[in-house]
Structures are given as C-alpha cells and as structure tokens.
Amino acid sequence: MEFDSLREAFDRVVEKRASSSAKAQEAIDQIVSEIGQAIMKMQMVNTDSMGSADHSSLLAELKAKLNKLAPLNQLEGCQKELNVALSKYLKLLEKSFSPDISKAYRNVDFETNTINSIIANHFYRQGLFDLGDLFVSECGESYAKDLKLRFQEMYSILEAMQARNLQPALCWAAKNHDQLLQNGSMLELKLHQLQFVEILTKGSRDEALKYARTHLVPFASLHKAEIQKLMACLLWADRLDQSPYAEFMSLTHWEKIAEEFTHQFCSLLGQSSESPLGVAISAGFQGLPTLLKLTTVMAAKKQEWQTMKQLPVPIDIGPEFQYHSVFVCPVLREQSSDENPPMLMPCGHVLSKQSIMKLSKNSSRPFKCPYCPSEAVASQCKQLHF
C-alpha cells in the first residue's frame, strides 16, 4: 500500500536526521575540545616579552587543526544527506496525495447537529473533557452530557488502576457482575487475581489468604486451575519473582486488564471500545489513494462512479477495519445485501437469494445445486445471518 511506502520514506528521514544530528554534535564537540586545549595552553604561557609570539603560534596551530577537521564540510555533508531524504519524502507526499480530495467522496446531505454530536462524543470518549466542553460551548448546544459523565467515571477508574489501586474497578465489576457474565467476560475474576497478587507481593501472606477465601472462592468451581495456581503462590510469598509463577507479576497483566476493562465498560454503554470517528478517519485515510485513482480513471472514461451501488475495484483497508462477515455469491459473483441475502440450501451450500430465484425460475420448479448433485426447492432454503 502507498501508506506503507510513505511510512518507510518518513522513517528514512528520521534516521537521516538522527545521523546528521549525531555527526554535527561530534564535529562541534571536536571544535570545542580543540579551542579548550588552545585556551589552556595560552593560560600556561608566561606573560613575558615572548608571550604574544607564543599566542600567535598557538592560534596558528589551532587554525591548522580546525582546517584539518574541516567542520563545515562535515556539517554540509550531513545536511546534504538529510535534504536528499527529505526531498524524496516530499515528492512522494505530493505524488500520493491530491490537494483536492472532494472528488473522492459522495455528495451526502448530513445534519450539522449530528456531526457536532459525533465530534463531541469523540473528545469525551478519548478523555479530552476540557476540549469537548469547549467544542460544545462554541457549538452553542449541549451534547451527550450523560455520556460525558460515564466516560469521566471510566477514566477515573483507569487512573486509579495506573496507580495500582484496583478498588474502584472491583466495585464497578461487582456492580455489573451479571452483565459481565452475559458478555462472557471474566473481568471480575482477573481483577481479583491481580489484587491477590498485589497483596501477596507486599509480603502479607495471611492477608492474601484471607482475601482469597473471601473473593476467589465464588469462582473456584468454574476456574479451579487458575485458583490452584494462585494458591501455590502462597508458598513463594517472599520470593514470588523467583518462583514458577513469576509471570503473575508481569506488567502486561495490568495493561491487558486495562484494555479489557475499557472494552467492557464501553460495551455496557452500548459503545464501541474505539472511537467511531477515529476509525472512520483512519479507514478513509487508507482508502483515499485508491478512491482518487478511481475518480481519475472514471473521469477519463466519462463515467460517474458516485451513482454506483458497488465500487468496481476492491479497497484494501486492512483487517483491523473489518468488523462484519461478507458473503459473495459464487454464481452471481456479487456481494450479498439486505435485498439479496445469503441462503442456505438443504445440501449445506450457500447461494444468494437472487441466484436461487433465477435457478428455480422464481420458485416454480426444483433446481440442482451448482456444487453437488442434490436438488432443492426454494421454499427449503433458509436465510443466513452472519
């Protein structure tokens, strides 16, 4: 992808800049060292009638050494390499991006209030509460006050977790125990595990055992193996970092639990764990070069792409932006839609509804599966939901 080549070019500029800076600093250090040595020699010279002659010889010697070092040539060479890399990067930027991107998107009517609400929500969910309040104030309207309060709660819990204080997170998990179980999340158990290890590492074996009896026992029937490992940690209370269970002390557990907490908190709010605005902009950024090329080609052919229901070329935006399964009918070679959903035949093969209607002559007769000898009628086919 062009984005990858841009990243590589940018990395080369960063590398050349670091190298140029290091070489420039080395040349400056050499100059400072030579001048410092010359000053020390001058200070050691006696202030007799020959003093000025000695100073002249020292200055001549310093000049010769500096000419030999050729600091200007060194600095010019470093800067030249950096300028070449920077020039190539700028040319690649100009080649990859068009200053006018308006031709790459459709003319869609939208409500200003809706867009403002999306932007305000983005600021709040990113924890930029002051910026969100300022944006809302300038818009002259009020957006998502309740959502702001909920995200403030989330970030206060995350800040406590960064300070190794799990109590707010544990209270929240206990309050939402049933909903977490419905989501198939064991966040509450993981938080208790971290708290148990935290108590144990502080050297309080009895306190850790008391905590386990109170908070870990309810999970023992379904998570016996995990609880047994935690109980074995009690034998290594003073040297857990040297035990077979040292991985319980890894900082990655804190990072992962913070990620899972954020995901579950947003899920219970009916929100995605990532900002929809951020995801949309990132995906659009990756797909923009392909769309710009498409508009140029379509314009040359005097065709209008904005009226098409489906783009004539695929746009690769990476797996991180793929959230839904996609079915392409093997007969019509078209992607399924609400009007043309995938249908499961009795034999187990899947075609689109339009294909089945075409093969069965609008449900008027049985038809043969394109992939096996089985026959079916349209009424036996069931719609699939991904």
Image (cartoon, rainbow, N blue to C red):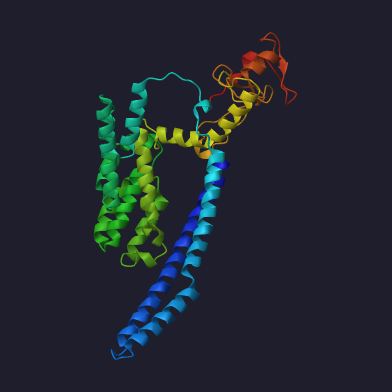
Which quadrant does the N terminus fall into? top right
Instruction: Say above or below: 268 vs 189.
Output: above
**Residue at screen point 62% across, 17% down:** 353
Q: Position of residue 150 (x, y in %)?
A: 27, 34
**Residue at screen point 39% across, 40% down:** 185
Q: Nearer the viewer, residue 344 or 333?
A: 333
Figure label count: 0
Q: Nearer the viewer, residue 341 or 78?
A: 78
Q: Position of residue 98 (x, y in %)?
A: 53, 34
**Residue at screen point 36% across, 22% down:** 112
Q: Position of residue 233 (x, y in %)?
A: 35, 61
**53 relative to 17 in the view: left or right:** left
Q: Nearer the viewer, residue 289 or 336?
A: 289
Is residue 318 at least partly visible in the picture? no
Is residue 43 at least partly visible in the picture? yes
**Residue at screen point 30% across, 84% down:** 43
Instruction: Say above or below: 95 vs 255.
Output: above
